[in-house]
Amino acid sequence: QQQRSSKKKNKCSHPNCTNWAVKSGICIKHGATPSAPRRCTHISGCTSYARSQGLCIKHGATWTKKICSVEGCQKYVKRNGVCISHGAKVERKVCSVDGCNSKVVREGVCQKHGAKREYKQCSAEDCTNFSVLRGVCVKH
């Protein structure tokens, strides 16, 4: 009888880093490159990613999202077997400025403390509106 080898997760060896090591004892932030996702092996021309047993969803891989464990709830699990409505805590990044509890927008700070949001212009000719979806504004 063969026993499964239990992989022990290690922390990144870079000083003061608390991330998990991916390859060669370091995390992605410090230069490790994660292995490329596997492609479906059912048909040689399939470009979808494999979910289980070398197959993608289209070619027979079974993959389902878990439903909240609270009786009667049909929402998807976020953490610890429950949805957000039933107590799953979702950690959100908070602005790094002392005393500010706003959500981070960019580079560790909120919009109030200098984070600029990027708005792209509509790609339609002679239009000066901001794009909303797929590079165009509501009008286009």
Image (cartoon, helix red, strand yellow):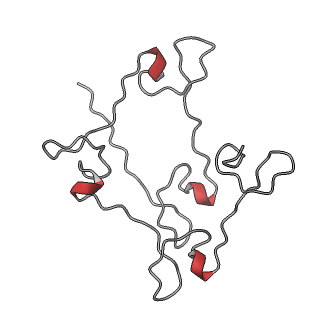
Can residue 83 be seen? Answer: yes
* The furthest residue to the left: 71
Q: Is residue 93 left or right of residue 71?
A: right
* Quadrant holding the N terminus: top left
**Residue 4 rendering spot, x and y as whole percentages:** 30, 34
Could you tell me if residue 55 is visible in this image? no
Quarter of the image where one finds residue 26: bottom right
Residue at position x 27%, y 51% in the image: 83
**Nearer-the-camera pick, 52 or 26:** 52
Q: Which of the pair 83/79 is nearer the observer? A: 83
Q: Which one is nearer the viewer's eye here, 47 or 28?
A: 47
Q: Residue at x 56, y 24 (%)?
A: 48
| Residue 51 image-quadrant placement | top left
Q: Is residue 92 left or right of residue 89?
A: right
Front residue (pair 43, 126)? 126
* In the image, farthest residue toward the right: 126
Q: Hey, which residue is sitting farthest front in the picture? A: 139
Residue sitting farthest toward the bottom? 99
Q: Quadrant of the C terminus?
A: top right
Task: Give x and y (percent) for residue 31.
Answer: 64, 55
The location of residue 25, given as percent across then percent down, is 53, 55
Is 84 on the left or on the right of 135, as rendered? left
Location of residue 138 in the rendering, given as x and y in whole percent from the top left corner: 66, 48
Query: Does 47 sit above or below residue 117?
Result: above
Left or right of 71, for residue 76: right
Q: Is residue 136 above or below residue 39?
A: below
Residue at 33% in and 36% down: 65
* Residue at the image point whose x is 65% and y is 51% from the top: 132
